[in-house]
Amino acid sequence: MEEDKSKKIPVDAKLLSDAIIELNISRRSVGLYPRDHPIIKESLVRAFDFLRNLFELGHDITLAVAKDVLMVGDFVLDARNPVFKEFAMSLHRKGIATVTFYSGLTMEELLGFHELLVSKDAAAGQAMIEYAEKKGIRSIKFIPLDISKFSFVEDRLREEGGGRALWESYISGLLNGKLAGSDGEGVALGIPPEDIASFINDRMPPDANEMTYDSVITSYLKKRDSGIRTELFSKFLSFINNLSPQLKGQFIKRAFNQPFVQSADIERLVRELTVYDVERLERIFHENTSLIPESLDNLLNKLSHAKAGESFFDTLSAEHGGIDDIQMDENILQLFKDDQFKKFVSEDYQKELNKMLQGSQAKTTVLAEELEKESQEQTVDRKFSEITLELLETDFIEKEDYLSLLSRISIMTDHFVETGRFSEISEIYNAVYSHTLTGKFKDEASGMVAYFFHSKEFLSKFIESLKVWGKVDREGALRLSKVNKLHLIIPLLDAVSDETAASVRKFLLDILGSLGSDIVPEVTRRLNDERWYVVRNMIYLLREAGGIKHVGYVRRFARVQNRKVCLEAIKTLIHFKTGDALSYIKLYLQCDDPVLRDQVVKLTGTYKYKGAVPHLLQLLEKRDVFGSKLYDKLSIARALGKIGDPRALPVLTKLCRSKAILYKAALNELKVEIFRGLDNYPPAAITGLLETGLRSKNDEIRTISEKMLGEKGAGDV
């Protein structure tokens, strides 16, 4: 069946596919490198050669575009081919419905064509024609998807009008029955079915009659001498898929009850569909089983009962008793039905068969897993990448081949970025960068590094990918960030400033912190940002990047009103052990803000800041008549335990031996916290306190004391 379809292509299928692939490569190259770069020249030459070979079969070649699908004549190119989809979308985004290449094409015209596609500022749609003429492009003609110069009148289309009004009148003509069925084909071919479906979802009258649905349906299922057009039916499936559930049901009801839709047409149509369209058809009716028209019921039953791995076409053949062109008797087919099988085969024999099958599966499981692993897309991509990099190292490679490999590598790298394959990208970067230092193609390799890896487009894609995939391949993300850090710092800082998700922001900050002191100049500049959270993050980065020489920029934030900025500044001063860090600690240990006070206490413990011990003890000994300072004292005892300074032990011992009439539970909780933190004190200095703990009525205190005294005794022995 595929051979029959390929005959519809007006040119050689393989040659056409290769030409489109090379056109897409050259388009991407033009978007990445300067106009006179050798990579652009090499990719243009390859694309031009393929087009020239096509012109030997005919003086022109026309590609039609339906969003992300390419068509040549009546033939729809493989909709699942990512290269075809990408090239189609590049044309669709510029409002191009068809593009025709003529045999007089020159390299300069092809370059200009690509510049139109990749330019973000160039005109689109109808204006593309004028723009192309200004650039001297004569051998490439566009039919734009710019319908602003048409407006609908009954029975015909005339020039004038435009914009949104045309969409309303053009499609409304179908809904109101003003557009003849013979004219409807132009709508199906000229406007993406997804757009038509979206418009109809919003504008379909709630009381629409059958004729309203029929007028749209006939624009797709138009009958020719050979029956319903397969390529339009494929568009019809896209149209159905994008309708609202209610409208989808109504269109399904009417679609196959049209007078021109015969059973023979349906079977022929389904046989001609691609596997992709068959899957879509099955999915549509699987979701709407109650709406299946009678004419399709039998065919869909075949779909639903098809064996795994068996195509629908195989199923159709099997029903007629033909398998691989071998005719089978109906009695034999009857035998394989489930109920007949049980009559002829006993249960014991069935069990034996099952055991045999299980044994066979067990033997092949390991091999099957290995094969599956080796055939996974990521594995194949990695192997291809390794082979390509090895080819770059060969001595016999010529400049033309080298440039071609660089073009392939850029496409591969883009794919790796989208899927978070940072380790592979890092290997590619290092390999290409090494060629900028040694080898006969230094200039070519330098161009790849400068115009691809250092480009805004690549850096933007990389940062967006980091947000999604960074934690999956953290090591690879760090490696790639470090080799590209000088170009990455500013856009990465911008991304941190704009990111709203805390977890993503923290990861990006970690990446920036790992880049070292190179980030410091830009970070200090951003300390003047008006947004408090940006300032806090910049102070954090100064600390992580080891910017002790720039700590003076931080000091002014240690007295600001914003608590989070203030704490980050104090933390940085303590981290760098500045001379004035203690003065800020004393200030905030005495402040009226309990949250700020508690956070500063925790910082002294985290950094084991011994200079704060006398001031912490002063707070710990402070009398608390009402018991309101218990939480503060627990926090102080915890911080002292982390610091482990012996100067604190007399005060702690006094507290552990004291008694209280009021707030006994609170005092007992404080004593437990003191014993929990004794690990960090010198063992010899805590013996007396541990002996006091042995006499405690608190089980946890006694347990801690017994354990530590036992360990101390064992150590002395």
Image: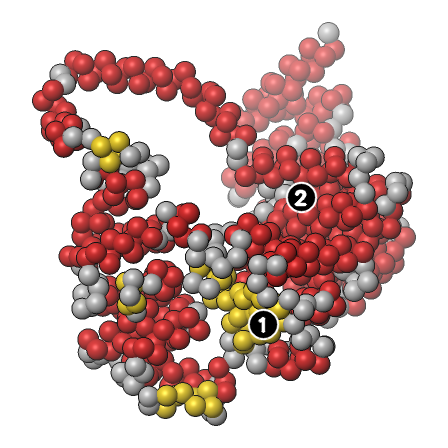
Q: Closer to the camera, 629 or 488?
A: 488
The quadrant in which residue 246 appears is: bottom left
Which residue: 20% across, 46% down? 301
Relative to 592, 293 lies left or right? left
Q: Closer to the camera, 167 or 102?
A: 102
- State the image coordinates of residue 602 (x, y, percent, origin top left): 68, 46
Amino acid at pointer 1? Lys
Colour scheme used in the picture? secondary structure
Amino acid at pointer 2? Phe
Q: Which residue is mark 1?
A: 94
Crowding around mark 1 (Cα neighbors within 10 Å: few <14, some 14 to 19, many 20+) is many
Q: Quadrant of the C terminus?
A: top right
Which residue: 41% across, 47% down? 2
- State the image coordinates of residue 173 (x, y, percent, origin top left): 33, 84
The span from disc 1 to disc 2 (Cα, nearest Å) is 32 Å
Q: Which residue is mark 2?
A: 422
Q: Can you say whether 23 is above or below 128 in the image? A: above
Crowding around mark 2 (Cα neighbors within 10 Å: few <14, some 14 to 19, many 20+) is many
- State the image coordinates of residue 206 (x, y, percent, origin top left): 24, 78
Q: Closer to the camera, 158 or 419?
A: 158
Q: Closer to the camera, 384 or 428?
A: 384
